[in-house]
Amino acid sequence: MCGIIARIGHGDAAETLLTGLENLEYRGYDSAGIAVQNGSGVKVHKCSGEVSELKSQLEAHPNGNMGIGHTRWSTHGPPTDENAHPHTDTVGDVAVVHNGVIDNYDELKADLRSKGHEFESDTDTEVIPHLIDEYRAETGDTETAVRKTVSTLEGSYAIAAIVDGEEAVYAARKGSPLVLGLDDDEWFLASDVPAFLDYTDEVIYLEEGDLVVLEPDSYQITDLDGTPVERSSDTVDWDPEDAGKGEFDHYMLKEIYNQPTSLSNTIEGRASDGEVSFENLTEGTFSDVDAVQFVACGTSYHAAMYGGQLLRSAGIRTEVLRASEYESTTGPVDENTLVVAVTQSGETADTLEAVREATSRGARSLAVTNVVGSTAARTADDAVYIRAGPEVGVAATKTYSSQAVTLALLTQQIASDVPGGEPAADKATLLESLQDLPEHVEEVLESSQAEAVARERLDSQSYFFIGHGLGHSVALEGALKFKEITYEHAEGFASGQLKHGPLALVTDETPIFAVYSGRGDEKTKTNAIEARSRGAPIIAVGPDDHSLADAADTNLSVPDTHPVWAGLLANVQLQLVSYHAAKLLERPIDKPRNLAKSVTVE
Ligand code: AGP
């Protein structure tokens, strides 16, 4: 939901800013812009469209050793040149990039207009450079002006500003992420680490209310009152190679094919000798928990459904709630409730808000996330990392698999800790078969017929996905992925629900992907066969040893494994179907229209 970057150091900044913005495009790609300072004014270049459009419009890189950049996902105003960031004050001395939403921008704008400020865009952001300008005139000092500005703003922000004639970048954050990158002779600020990972892996995750002033040879972090604060640095263990596309046409395909590796990393050291152990969660961590609530959105919600079902079957009172609906759907919460935020990015506003609400009611919190130092990781009482490595494609793939595995393992630990919890009776077998999962994913990737299936069903009217039990969440995820990147209509259902309404839509133009576990999944088999007798083509997705495979038109088979892991293998097949269908339809797979990877607005 918008990516920002800033750089100050020796040598020109423009190239670095543009590369950084390309690495942040997963956060939004409606418009892009940079502003650089070169001693003869602040130069702003911006346009609607992707960073590639901005690059093609720049005849030569503007000179200047410091600058700011932005790639946008529109909230206030359409994706036009005028609404692209950076925004400036009336005379163009102050340039600002912003990620977040300013709730009180209307009244601030009216007030500033009455003082003679002129506005050019529909954005909420534009009030920020005008406020800085106003307070500079009042106080004669830019740092004080930035401090006054951010204390006037209501809402969320990560901002970076440059000012004509000053060798400094000013930045602040509240409610939106901002990371400081430290290199030998240059500093960076960005919404996320991949923006500057080519240059440095030493980072400081800024905290709520931090205000930073970067100068070419020094930086200072203060709180909103101006008191200096110490923040320790971390070394990021992501390889810059991980953030690139490699030999693949799309990030999504690269990330699907990365799953044997990412899953091995997720599992490593956490499931050995028949026991589960997380590095930071000692035995008994959850002994006072008597109920668990999962909160999540989108794909993470489907992973949470997976984990939730396993936890329920381990005898723990469990709710799986859509984070955006938390307030209206939660049951009673108290200090014995554990709220588990499942979020790849750790920055999803709806999920963070649900955690805030749950903790304000007394719950204890745990973040299950991929991003070290993310807001979820820093604000929850505990954090477990899914260790999937960077995921750039807007459509989540490898992170879903790593989330589901992490939650399945977490379930075993919670069930062991909570009095009355019942860890799986076949826990040793479950954990042993988990070791084979990366290899089984490899087998699916090597032998999948997903491309042929996608081609055969390409001109269908609608695509249905059904599944029962753990397969239900896989069916929902399969449908979400399909609609997200193909723009075709797709719906997921619990197998048994088909006959309660959706069957009315079934024709020979509605292929049904039936996710089945291969053992005792009679509901999926029966309902798929009922739909088939109404003309629907059936694609069975699961192990071969099930009679549904014989009744189906096509099979996307997966290796035989423990039923808990079978759904994850089926999901890999469905990821490939979506990918190939979207490719055949020539969709912009990594950047589907209207979407952004990290949704930092409610
Ligand atoms: C998945 O393909 C989507 N892009 C989206 O549903 C995503 O899973 C959701 O926005 C939640 O994101 P999070 O995991 O970063 O919280």
Image: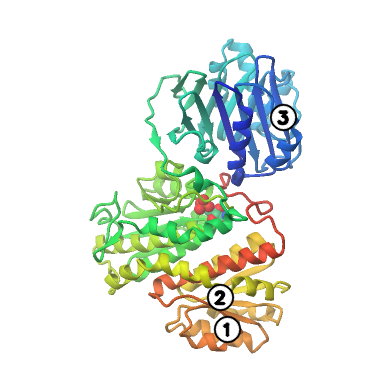
> The residue tagged with tag 2: helix, strand or loop?
strand
In which image quadrant can residue 423 be found?
A: bottom left
Residue at the spot of label 2: 466
The front one of 164 and 286 is 164
Residue at the spot of label 3: 45
Report x, y in % for residue 311: 36, 66
Give the quadrant of the N terminus: top right
Report x, y in % for residue 405: 40, 62
Q: Is residue 575 left or right of residue 52?
A: left
Report x, y in % for residue 531: 62, 84
> The residue tagged with tag 1: helix, strand or loop?
helix
What colour-coding does the image apply? rainbow
Residue at the spot of label 1: 528
In which image quadrant can residue 38 be found?
A: top right
The front one of 68 and 297 is 68
In three-dimensional space, the C-alpha distance between marks 2 and 1, rounded to whole angstroms, equals 8 Å
Q: Is residue 368 visible?
A: yes
The furthest residue to the top: 140
Vertical arrangement, residue 487 with respect to residue 539, above or below: above
Q: Callout 1: 10 Å neighbours few (<14), some, many (20+)?
A: many
Q: Amino acid at mark 2?
A: Ile
Q: Earlier in the sequence, mark 2 or mark 1?
A: 2
Q: Is residue 471 left or right of residue 132?
A: left
Q: Amino acid at mark 3?
A: His
**Residue at the image position 70 percent from the left and 23 percent from the top:** 43
**Residue at the image position 62 percent from the left and 74 percent from the top:** 464
Q: Amino acid at mark 1?
A: Ala
> The residue tagged with tag 3: helix, strand or loop?
strand
Q: Earlier in the sequence, mark 2 or mark 3?
A: 3
In three-dimensional space, the C-alpha distance between marks 3 and 1, rounded to whole angstroms, equals 56 Å
Task: Please tell me whether mark 3 or mark 1 is closer to you in this view.
Answer: 3
In three-dimensional space, the C-alpha distance between marks 2 and 3, rounded to whole angstroms, equals 49 Å
